[in-house]
């Protein structure tokens, strides 16, 4: 649930999603779900030629299991908040 | 985590401007798989599958696992230009009503119907049978390459995880 909550704080930010097949897609994060599937608006790809049909795409739904990285800008993240949340999550897990 | 037909209906009616209660409903369902896909229903979409295929069609229905039903589906294969010989190529075959199991989806996107065929103008269309054969050969070559890579990594004490089903 931690990363689900984390991604919820990133909604409306611009991110670059790198998939396991090396394709990178830049877009505005509009939605996330419990599986960390992502929904991006206003997309653009770095490598246009490999996926030419993406030029006509406005919104993209990306299945979480295919994501390798989500590139963020450093100022999107409040690290202290994230550390606190991780600590709480770790304590909750340890207590189980 | 499933959305019953009534709840989904509520979400859809509130999208067209419902009462306060319905808005609350929509808020709690905003971050779900279904909520991400419902906006694309009855629109033309493309789906990329884990085996590398691209399917284009009108999304008719879906569920929380991203299982999809597409109407007037067309499978399209894109190929690079034959060495030194000009145009990049593509091939199409109609697939009718197509049901996709959610686990095979890599990504899906709504197409702008005014722009969706633009990139095809610079490409040459070829027969689907030969495109499919060439595509499968490309994938076989890639599997070989990944197997070799996994071997090399293993020699150095590293693991290169390549799932044979993932050819996207």
Image (cartoon, rainbow, N blue to C red):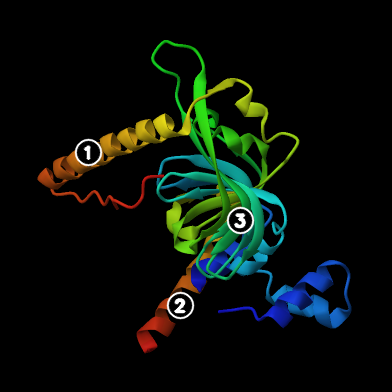
Image x and y of residue B81, in percent: 45, 19
- Alpha-carbon neighbours of circle 1 within 10 Å: few (<14), some, or many (≥20)? few
- Alpha-carbon neighbours of circle 3 within 10 Å: few (<14), some, or many (≥20)? many
Q: Is residue A79 above or below residue B21?
A: above
Q: Specify whether disc 1 shares its chain with disc 2.
A: no
Q: CA distance from mark 1 to mark 2?
A: 42 Å
Image x and y of residue A15, in percent: 58, 47
Please identify the quadrant where the C terminus of chain B is shown: top left
Looking at the image, residue B21 sits to the left or right of residue B109; the answer is right
Q: Chain of mark 1?
A: B
* Nearest-to-viewer mark from 1 and 2: 1
Q: Nearer the viewer, residue A60 or B138?
A: B138
Looking at the image, residue B64 sits to the left or right of residue B12; the answer is left
Q: Residue at x 76, y 76 (%)?
A: B9
Q: Residue at x 51, y 32 (%)?
A: B91
Label 2 SS: helix
Q: Quadrant of residue B142?
A: top left
Image x and y of residue A5, in percent: 57, 69
Q: Is residue A77 above or below residue B57?
A: below
Q: Chain of mark 2?
A: A
Label 1 SS: helix
Looking at the image, residue B50 sits to the left or right of residue B17; the answer is left
Q: Nearer the viewer, residue B85 or B151?
A: B85
Which residue is denoted by mark 2 in the rendering?
A89
Label 3 SS: strand
Image x and y of residue A73, in percent: 57, 47
Q: Nearer the viewer, residue A78 or B26?
A: B26
Q: Residue at x 36, y 30 (%)?
A: B134
Which residue is denoted by mark 3 in the rendering?
B70
């Amino acid at each position: 649930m931690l990363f689900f909550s984390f991604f919820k704080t990133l909604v409306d930010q611009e991110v670059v999603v790198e998939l396991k097949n090396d394709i990178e897609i830049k877009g505005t994060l509009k939605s996330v779900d419990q599986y960390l599937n992502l929904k991006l608006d206003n997309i653009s790809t770095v490598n246009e030629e490999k996926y030419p049909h993406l030029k006509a795409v406005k919104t993209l739904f990306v299945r979480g299991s295919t994501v390798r990285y989500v590139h963020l800008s450093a100022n999107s993240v409040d690290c202290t908040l994230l550390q606190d949340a991780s600590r709480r999550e770790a304590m909750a897990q340890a207590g189980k | 985590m499933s959305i019953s037909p009534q709840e989904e209906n509520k979400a859809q009616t509130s999208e067209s401007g419902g009462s306060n209660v319905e808005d609350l409903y929509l808020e709690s369902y905003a971050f779900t798989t279904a909520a991400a896909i419902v906006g694309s229903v009855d629109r033309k979409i493309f789906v990329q599958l884990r085996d590398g295929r691209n399917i284009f069609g009108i999304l008719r229905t879906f569920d929380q696992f991203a299982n999809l039903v597409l109407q007037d589906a067309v499978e399209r294969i894109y190929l690079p230009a034959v060495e030194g010989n000009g145009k990049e190529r593509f091939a199409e075959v109609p697939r009718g009503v197509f049901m996709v199991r959610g686990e095979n989806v890599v990504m899906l996107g709504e197409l702008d119907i005014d722009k969706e065929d633009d990139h095809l103008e610079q490409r040459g269309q070829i027969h689907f049978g030969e495109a499919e054969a060439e595509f499968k050969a490309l994938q076989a070559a890639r599997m070989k390459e990944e197997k070799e890579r996994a071997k090399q990594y293993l020699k150095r004490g590293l693991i290169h995880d390549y799932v044979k089903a993932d050819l996207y």
